[in-house]
């Protein structure tokens, strides 16, 4: 099978698409975070629709926005990720807030302050690997680890919460499609146990 046909399932001509690396919540963690989101939404007086469980993620690095996803970009991203060696880790998320945005709806997010060294290590290693394969133009040194819970026109102030601890043992390359809104997992890489 040619590489072109191998990546055909990730094409959606004429539709804005994003390619990015992320950490996904485990299957057991998604219902817990979905329930938490509904509770916070009610307490904060927000009306936005919670992010569906399968799309809950913590972004690591964007690889770009495309009208048609180039195979060479996918291949380079896969090559970069395969070279990353980092340990599995847990992160304690202990704050919620609304990020400022110029768009009509703003992200209401869950933020972390514990477990950051391991998370930043993975972010840095993956960023270095992306530079090595020619995708460095997409690497950002700025990194604000968060999980977007929903989007809303209203804003909620920063609040401390009882920590929600999630363990991450792999990371994925995600192809995000706009219409219909869905995430296609291109590939997954295990973190060292």
Image (tube, rainbow, N blue to C red):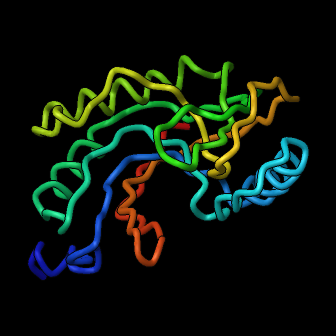
Give the x, y percent position of residue 40. Answer: 84, 45
Residue drawn at x 15%, y 81% as measured from the top left: 5
Q: Is residue 1 above or below residue 76?
A: below
Give the x, y percent position of residue 89. Answer: 60, 32
Give the x, y percent position of residue 95. Answer: 75, 27
Q: In the rendered view of the protein, which quadrant contains the C terminus? A: top right
Give the x, y percent position of residue 185. Answer: 42, 64
Q: In the picture provided, is 188 more to the left or to the right than 153?
A: left
Q: For residue 167, which quarter of the picture?
A: top right
Q: Nearer the viewer, residue 107 or 31?
A: 107
Q: Is residue 60 above or below residue 124?
A: below
Q: Nearer the viewer, residue 88 or 12?
A: 12
Residue drawn at x 74%, y 25% as measured from the top left: 158
Residue drawn at x 53%, y 49% as measured from the top left: 104
Q: In this view, does 134 lie above or below 152?
A: above
Q: Which of 48 and 136 is in front in this view?
A: 48
């Amino acid at each position: 099978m040619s590489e072109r046909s191998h990546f055909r399932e990730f094409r959606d001509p004429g539709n804005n698409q994003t390619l990015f690396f992320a950490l996904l919540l485990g299957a057991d963690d998604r219902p817990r975070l979905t329930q938490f989101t509904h509770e916070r939404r009610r307490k904060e007086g927000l009306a936005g629709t919670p992010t569906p469980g399968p799309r809950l993620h913590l972004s690591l690095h964007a690889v770009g926005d495309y009208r048609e996803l180039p195979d060479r970009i996918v291949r380079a991203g896969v090559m970069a990720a395969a070279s990353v060696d980092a340990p599995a880790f847990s992160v304690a998320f202990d704050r919620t807030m609304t990020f400022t945005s110029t768009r009509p709806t703003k992200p209401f997010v869950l933020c972390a302050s514990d477990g950051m060294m391991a998370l930043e290590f993975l972010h840095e290693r993956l960023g270095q690997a992306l530079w090595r394969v020619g995708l460095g133009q997409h690497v950002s040194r700025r990194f604000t680890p968060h999980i977007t819970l929903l989007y809303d026109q209203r804003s909620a102030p920063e609040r401390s919460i009882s920590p929600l601890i999630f363990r991450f043992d792999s990371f994925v390359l995600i192809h995000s499609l706009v219409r219909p809104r869905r995430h296609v997992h291109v590939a997954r890489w295990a973190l060292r146990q």
